[in-house]
Image (cartoon, helix red, strand yellow):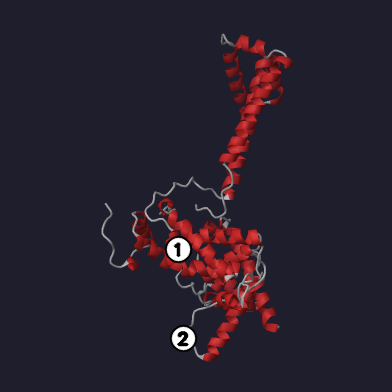
C-alpha cells in the first residue's frame, strides 16, 4: 500500500484561493496558509483587492439618460423576431459538426458509387480491410447497392456515366451544387454580430 | 387584455416588468432603464474609459434590449441578457477603435475645456470624512487606473465578478467563455491588478 502524497506543502490552487477570498476554504488550504507565508500574504492581498473592487463607487449616469433612451425606443411596436442568435463558439461547433457530417456523407456516397461501379473489387476489399462492426456496415452498403443495381432504371444510369468523359459533366454539376450548398449554409450560419442578443 | 397596472414597480421581478413592457407599457420600459442604467453605464464606462462614448454605448445597449424586449427568454436572467449586450457593445467598440489609453481626466475626443470638464469621471459622493474621502478617492483612482491597464477580456471578467458581483457561471454565459477560462482570466486579472497597484503606489 502506497502512502498518500503530502499535499500540505503545495501552494494554493486558483480555486482554493478563490474559496479563501470568499471566506471559506477546505482543510488543506487552511492548514497550508497556516504555514506558508507566501500564500497567506496572497490571500490577504487578494481579499484587500476584492474589497477595494467591491467598494468602487458606481459611475454617475448622465442626467436625462432615461429620456434620451426612451426617445429612441419604439414602445409596443411589433418587434422583429430575431433569428436565433448563436455565439461564435456555437457557430464554430455547428460548422465542425456540419463539416464532419458532410465529410462522412461524402465518404459513404463515394463508397456507394465505387461499389456500384465494381461490386467484385469492393467485395474483395471488404474481406481484407474491414471486419466486425465496420464489416457489417459495409455489408449494409453493399445490400443497398445490390438492391439499387437491380432497379430497372439502373442500367440506363450506369450507361450514362460509364466512362470518365461521360461522367465528367455530372461530376462537375454535383461539385457545383455541393459548392452552392456550402455557400448557402455558410451564409445561414454566418457569425452573429458581437452586439446581438442571445 | 393588458392586466392591472402595478402600483409599485419596484416590487416586481425583472421578468414581471418585462411582461408589462411586452404589453406596451411605457412605465415598464422606464423601470427597466432605472434598474439597470447605473450598473450598465458603470460597466461600459470602465470598459471604454470615455464618458461621452460610454453614454452612447449605454444608450445603444438599452435601445437594443428594449426594442427587442419581446425576444427576451425568461429562462435566463434579464440582468445576464443586458450585461451581455452591454459587454458585447463595449468590446465591439474597443476592437473598432483600439482604445488603450486611460482618460480619467476627460474624453480624449473632447476638443474644448468645457468638453473635458463634461466628460471627466464623476463618481457618487459618499458620506465620508474629508480624509477618508480623499483616501478612498485616491485608492479608487488607483484601482480605476489599474483596471484600465488590463486586457479587455480580463477587464470584463474582473468587473463583472468583483464590481458587479456576478457569479462565475453567469459571467461564463454572458461572455460566452468556458467556466475554466473565466476563472483563469479573473485569477490573472487579480494578479495583474496586484502588481499594477503596487507599482502605482510605489510611484
Q: Nearer the viewer, mark 1 or mark 2?
A: 1
* Cα–Cα span, label 1 and label 2: 31 Å
Q: Residue B168: x and y, percent?
A: 53, 63
Can you say whether B128 is above or below A13 in the image? below
Q: Residues within 10 Å of mark 1 (few under 14, many from 20)?
A: many
Can you say whether B156 is above or below B133 in the image? above
Residue situated in front as seen by the camera: B22 or A49: B22
Q: Name the chain letter of the residue that bears numbered label 1.
A: A
The answer to whether residue A13 is seen in the rendering is: no
Can you say whether B98 is above or below B139 in the image? above
Residue located 49% across and 75% down the image = A60
Where disc 2 sits, the SS reads loop
The answer to whether residue A72 is seen in the rendering is: yes
Can you say whether A36 is above or below A112 in the image? below
Residue on which disc 2 sits: B127
Residue located 48% across and 83% down the image = B126
Residue on which disc 1 sits: A69
Q: Residue B118: x and y, percent?
A: 55, 76
Query: Which disc, if any, is residue B124?
Result: none
Q: Residue B6: x and y, percent?
A: 29, 63
Where disc 1 sits, the SS reads helix
Residue located 60% across and 41% down the image = A95
Q: Are marks 1 and 2 on the same chain?
A: no
Amino acid at each position: 500500500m502506497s502512502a498518500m502524497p503530502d499535499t500540505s506543502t503545495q501552494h494554493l490552487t486558483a480555486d482554493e484561493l478563490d474559496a479563501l477570498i470568499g471566506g471559506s476554504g477546505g482543510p488543506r488550504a487552511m492548514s497550508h496558509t497556516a504555514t506558508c507565508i507566501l500564500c497567506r500574504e496572497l490571500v490577504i492581498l487578494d481579499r484587500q483587492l476584492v474589497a477595494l473592487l467591491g467598494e468602487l463607487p458606481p459611475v454617475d449616469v448622465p442626467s436625462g439618460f432615461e429620456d434620451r433612451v426612451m426617445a429612441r425606443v419604439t414602445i409596443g411596436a411589433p418587434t422583429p423576431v430575431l433569428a436565433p442568435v448563436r455565439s461564435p463558439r456555437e457557430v464554430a461547433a455547428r460548422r465542425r459538426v456540419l463539416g464532419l457530417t458532410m465529410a462522412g456523407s461524402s465518404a459513404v456516397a463515394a463508397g456507394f458509387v465505387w461499389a456500384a461501379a465494381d461490386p467484385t473489387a469492393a467485395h474483395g476489399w471488404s474481406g481484407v480491410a474491414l471486419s466486425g462492426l465496420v464489416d457489417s456496415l459495409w455489408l449494409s452498403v453493399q445490400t443497398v447497392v445490390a438492391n439499387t443495381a437491380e432497379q430497372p432504371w439502373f442500367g440506363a444510369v450506369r450507361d450514362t456515366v460509364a466512362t470518365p468523359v461521360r461522367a465528367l459533366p455530372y461530376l462537375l454539376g454535383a461539385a457545383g451544387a455541393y459548392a452552392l450548398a456550402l455557400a448557402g449554409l455558410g451564409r445561414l450560419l454566418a457569425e452573429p454580430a458581437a452586439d446581438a442578443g442571445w | 387584455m393588458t392586466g392591472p397596472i402595478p402600483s409599485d414597480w419596484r416590487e416586481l421581478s425583472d421578468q414581471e416588468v418585462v411582461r408589462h413592457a411586452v404589453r406596451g407599457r411605457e412605465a415598464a420600459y422606464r423601470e427597466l432603464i432605472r434598474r439597470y442604467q447605473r450598473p450598465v453605464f458603470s460597466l461600459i464606462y470602465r470598459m471604454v474609459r470615455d464618458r461621452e462614448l460610454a453614454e452612447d454605448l449605454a444608450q445603444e445597449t438599452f435601445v437594443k434590449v428594449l426594442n427587442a424586449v419581446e425576444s427576451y427568454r425568461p429562462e435566463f436572467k434579464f440582468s445576464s441578457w443586458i450585461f451581455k449586450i452591454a459587454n458585447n457593445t463595449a468590446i465591439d467598440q474597443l476592437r473598432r477603435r483600439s482604445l488603450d489609453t486611460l482618460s480619467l481626466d476627460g474624453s480624449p475626443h473632447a476638443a474644448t475645456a468645457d468638453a473635458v470638464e463634461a466628460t471627466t469621471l464623476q463618481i457618487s459622493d459618499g458620506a465620508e470624512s474629508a480624509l477618508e474621502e480623499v483616501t478612498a478617492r485616491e485608492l479608487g483612482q488607483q484601482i480605476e487606473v489599474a483596471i484600465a491597464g488590463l486586457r479587455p477580456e480580463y477587464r470584463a471578467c474582473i468587473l463583472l465578478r468583483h464590481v458587479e458581483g456576478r457569479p462565475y457561471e453567469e459571467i461564463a454565459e454572458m461572455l460566452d467563455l468556458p467556466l475554466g477560462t473565466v476563472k483563469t482570466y479573473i485569477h490573472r486579472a487579480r494578479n495583474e491588478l496586484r502588481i499594477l497597484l503596487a507599482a502605482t503606489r510605489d510611484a
